[in-house]
Amino acid sequence: MSVVVARELRRDFVVGRGADRKPLLLRAVDGVSFTIGQGETLGLVGESGSGKSTTGRMLVGMLPPTSGHLALFGETVSYNPAAFARLRRRLQFVFQDPSAALDPRMRVGSSIAEPLEAAGGMTRWDRTGRVAELLDMVGLPRHAAERYPHEFSGGQRQRIVIARALALRPEFIVCDEPVSALDVSMQAQIVNLLLDLQESFGLSYLFVAHDLAVTRSVSNRVAVMYAGSIVELAPRRALYDTPQHPYTRALLAAVPRPDPHAPRREVIGGEVPSLLYRPPGCIFAARCPHAMAVCRSEVPTPREIAPGHQAACHLY
Ligand code: ATP
Ligand code: SF4
Ligand code: MG
């Protein structure tokens, strides 16, 4: 069963008024479709502002879509707060910056226990036991519960945030750049922790990152996002070994590779287009070395070019 089924999810933000007083709409996410299976990790990669966090927030009910269809655990999602309350326990969101996610004045144990307390139904004694169990799970000593966030490193703080996210035994977690703020050695540790937890509890993840280096070790499949659209989606091997979309190839060119003699991949200059005044046709056309006349007039729709491998590009 798919844990997440997203069809044509779209999200606009009103960012002001035009000269004609009509609302100015910024289309942050322009109709994305994908699924995430049980125990699966879908990597979601793209430059800053491509709509990754907005997509993730829609999946866990933090932000209603402007249009589109979302089903979680086989049920169509309605964003009315009462209906969503039932689902909320099964969903979690881990942010990039663990310091911002933790109250500096609260002991770590109280921070981790907070969702348990809010959910109710547990005695203080039970909660203390559960906090100890959660600290074990994320590889922190039990006495960490008595200390404050500033006494820990960035990586340890991210472990605390993950412990809190796991408190209510969620099934699906959006990890929004969970290692971007950490140094490289710490990144690998947190990634391994997330993988271990996934194996132990059958968790499903949407794993957001801004480059393709980090997602490689965690994702079963990877979706590449550009200016609000998913331009390519493929199983991990296919995406890294045979990328099809010119933008994916450009992103891969930026990933350091072990073989220094391998031929250089194409690097793409230019800037992400304005999301306020979207050009007609392919949103990548202004930066694409392969752009043709049709690219400037017709929006390419995603097409399956191999089993499970789709790209939205007029070259295919
Ligand atoms: P980053 O890598 O910087 O985190 P992102 O891919 O997560 O970027 P989003 O945060 O989803 O991108 O933002 C997509 C676009 O939507 C951006 O142009 C952003 O400025 C805009 N946006 C996001 N949230 C809002 C909001 N609440 N109001 C107005 N615009 C917003
Ligand atoms: Fe480039 Fe055209 Fe493909 Fe867009 S549709 S990525 S402009 S070749
Ligand atoms: Mg983001």
Image: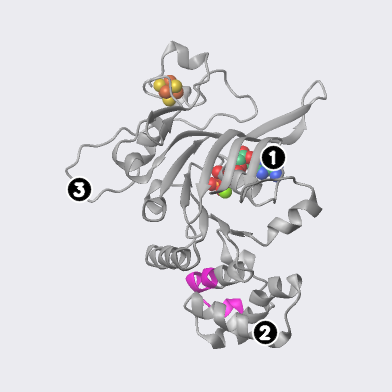
Question: CA gap, disc 3 to disc 1?
Answer: 43 Å
**Which mark identifies residue 227?**
none
Residue density around tag 1, few if under 14, some if 14–19, many if 20 or more, within 10 Å: many
Residue in view at x 23 percent, y 51 percent? 258
Q: Position of residue 31 (x, y in %)?
A: 60, 32
Q: Marks 2 and 3: which is nearer the front? A: 2
> CB atoms at circles 1 and 2 under 8 Å apart?
no
Up-down: is 285 above or below 116?
above
**Of callouts 2 and 3, which one flags the residue occurring earlier in the amino acid sequence?**
2
Label 1: element kind: loop
Residue 259, label in figure:
3
Can residue 238 be seen in the rendering of this structure? yes
Residue 73 lies, with reference to residue 152, above or below; the image says above
Please give left or right for residue 93 compared with residue 254 in the image.
Answer: right
Dominant secondary-structure state across the stretch colored magenta: helix
* Mark 3 Cα shell of 10 Å, populated few (<14), some (14-19), many (≥20): few
User: Ligand 2 lies in which image quarter?
Assistant: top left
Name which quarter of the figure residue 23 lies in.
top right
Q: Secondary structure at mark 3?
A: loop
Task: Tell me which amino acid carries mark 2.
Answer: Asp
| Image disc number at residue 65 | 1
Residue 189 percent coordinates (x, y): 40, 68
Q: Tell me the kind of residue under disc 3.
A: Asp
Q: Which residues are magenta?
A: 147-159
Closest to the observer, 22 or 297: 297
Q: Nearer the viewer, residue 74 or 255?
A: 74
Mark 3 or 1, closer to the camera = 1
Q: Is mark 3 within 8 Å of ligand 2?
A: no
Identify the residue under disc 2.
126
**Which residue is rendered at x = 64% and y = 49% of the image?**
57
Dots 2, 3 in contact, CB < 8 A: no
Disc 1 C-beta below 8 A from ligand 1: no
